[in-house]
Image: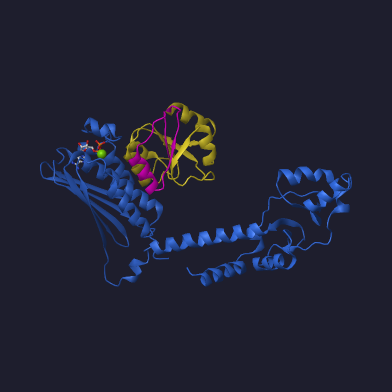
């Protein structure tokens, strides 16, 4: 971003943001009937340089650290705040655009302005220059994140492609017996589905299912592959390997049934919950297997809530 | 419960991830069996485990678990930290036992990923 574009963006934001968007609302106030000596604690503890003076919610003045020091020098610590405060004060309305605040700071050179509501003139907060800077930075940051998200969102893809039928296909190869790489396919698919703009719940179900299936390939076979087909209505994930196959498919599907060797158990799997988990998180699951030939697992997750490119 | 409070209760150190004290975590789960976490863990929860391998991070990632806390003073190795960093999983470590970690959080009001709402 070049300099002129940055400045225009910031100027734009000062028109877009309202004073109330950036002000500190949790502020200390004092009543005008108190002695000046009480200011010491407030100014010192809160590390602020001025306090609005408020009676019954109504702003009547502002008293600053300079006022306090003057009283200290002249031995007037018992004087009432109302006699030492500035009464003619410049204020801002909460619903004014931020640019008005910027202009007032330039014009008067004050450190802060009390902010009041237009309706009942009650004090709602205080604004300092650093509030303005913080507010703008925060807004810039969110704008940046939104832009990032949008760039990665490919959710409009089904709308932009013109064909009678569209399938997206993502293919992943899974190494057998290599636990260091187990999970790469599932987490890769997860990121991809998320970028397509699918709902977090759908993405979660698809990635948990894929992950358990991937763990099985790693644990029980010499390798295999995972292919995900996505169309506007469903995600279909096909997980295949070339053996050893499952002798009793019905039994393998039972919760708790496991032939997992010790090294699989040590890694946090192998309690016979993998296939039941896949069943739980998918809308349809089909398992076919031939001993020595291999295993074929098909998982379907329906996209009823597919957010069509909004 | 704010993450800063969880950190304080567990006397935990932050190893990696975008730690933000203001992050809200409502639910906790604990197991050394990752299939159990996949089945019962809830999105946005904290996982306490004494298992230290990269599959803990992968599990947290696919199950949308925000924070992993390794208990009993176990220090995860570099691969685990790197994977967590890459996937924005926040990693805590604590010297407390699993039992005490869970007990303290539960006593302070963190909810369990209870059996009653297991359905997807
Ligand atoms: N792709 C596969 N190839 C061979 N056997 C498998 C495969 N997937 C699952 N199995 C068998 O089915 C059993 C149950 O699988 P699963 O429900 O994932 O539980 P776990 O992996 O914890 O044992 C496994 O123990 C294994 O015997
Ligand atoms: Mg399994």
Q: State the hue of chain A.
A: blue
Say if B93 sits above or below B20 in the image.
above
Q: Is residue B93 magenta?
A: yes
Q: State the hue of chain B.
A: yellow
Say if B24 sits above or below B98 in the image.
below
**Chain part drawn in magenta:** B68-97
Q: Residue B33 placed where, x, y %?
A: 33, 34
- Left or right relative to A218: residue A135: right
- Quadrant containing the C terminus of chain A is bottom left
- Comparing A55 with A82, the one in front is A82
Q: Is residue A159 magenta?
A: no
Q: Residue A31 placed where, x, y %?
A: 82, 49
Which residue is found at the position 32% from the left and 44% from the top?
A: A280
Say if A192 sits above or below B64 in the image.
below
Res A64 seen here: no
Which of the 4 image quarters holds residue B115?
A: top left
Q: Residue A142 placed where, x, y %?
A: 51, 59
Which residue is found at the position 35% from the left and 54% from the top?
A: A191
């Amino acid at each position: 971003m070049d300099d002129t574009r940055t400045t225009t963006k910031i100027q734009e934001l000062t028109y877009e943001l309202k004073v109330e968007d950036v002000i500190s609302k949790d502020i200390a106030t004092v009543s005008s009937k108190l002695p000046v000596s009480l200011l010491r604690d407030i100014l010192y503890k809160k590390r602020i340089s001025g306090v609005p003076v408020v009676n019954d919610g109504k702003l009547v003045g502002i008293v600053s650290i300079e006022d306090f020091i003057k009283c200290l020098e002249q031995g007037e610590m018992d004087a009432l705040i109302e006699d030492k405060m500035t009464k003619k004060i410049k204020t801002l309305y909460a619903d004014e655009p931020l640019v008005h605040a910027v202009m007032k700071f330039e014009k008067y050179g004050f450190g802060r302005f009390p902010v009041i509501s237009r309706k009942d003139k009650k004090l709602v907060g205080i604004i300092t220059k650093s509030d303005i800077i913080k507010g703008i930075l925060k807004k810039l940051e969110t704008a940046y994140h939104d832009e990032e998200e949008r760039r990665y969102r490919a959710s409009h893809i089904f709308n932009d492609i013109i064909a009678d039928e569209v399938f997206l296909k993502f293919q992943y190869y899974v190494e057998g017996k290599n636990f260091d790489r187990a999970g790469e396919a599932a987490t890769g698919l997860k990121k991809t589905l998320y970028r397509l703009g699918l709902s977090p719940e759908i993405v979660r179900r698809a990635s948990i299912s894929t992950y358990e299936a991937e763990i099985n390939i790693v644990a029980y076979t010499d390798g295999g592959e995972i292919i995900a087909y996505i169309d506007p209505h469903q995600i279909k994930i096909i997980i295949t390997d070339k053996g050893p196959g499952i002798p009793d498919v019905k039994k393998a599907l039972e919760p708790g049934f496991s032939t997992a060797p010790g090294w699989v158990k040590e890694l946090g799997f192998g309690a016979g919950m993998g296939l039941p988990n896949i069943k739980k998180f998918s809308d349809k699951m089909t398992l076919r297997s031939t001993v020595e030939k291999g295993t074929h697992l098909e998982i379907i997750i329906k996209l009823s809530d597919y957010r069509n490119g909004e | 419960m704010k993450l800063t409070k969880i950190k304080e209760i567990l006397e935990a150190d932050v190893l990696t991830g975008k730690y933000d004290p203001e992050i809200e975590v409502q639910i906790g789960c604990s197991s050394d069996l990752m299939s159990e976490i996949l089945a019962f863990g809830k999105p946005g929860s904290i996982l306490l485990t004494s298992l230290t391998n990269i599959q803990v991070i992968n599990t947290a990632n696919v199950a949308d678990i925000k924070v992993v806390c390794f208990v009993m003073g176990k220090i995860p190795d570099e691969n685990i930290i790197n994977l967590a960093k890459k996937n924005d999983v926040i990693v805590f470590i604590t010297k407390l036992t699993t039992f005490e970690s869970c007990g303290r959080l539960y006593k302070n009001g963190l909810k369990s990923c209870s059996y009653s709402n297991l359905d997807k």
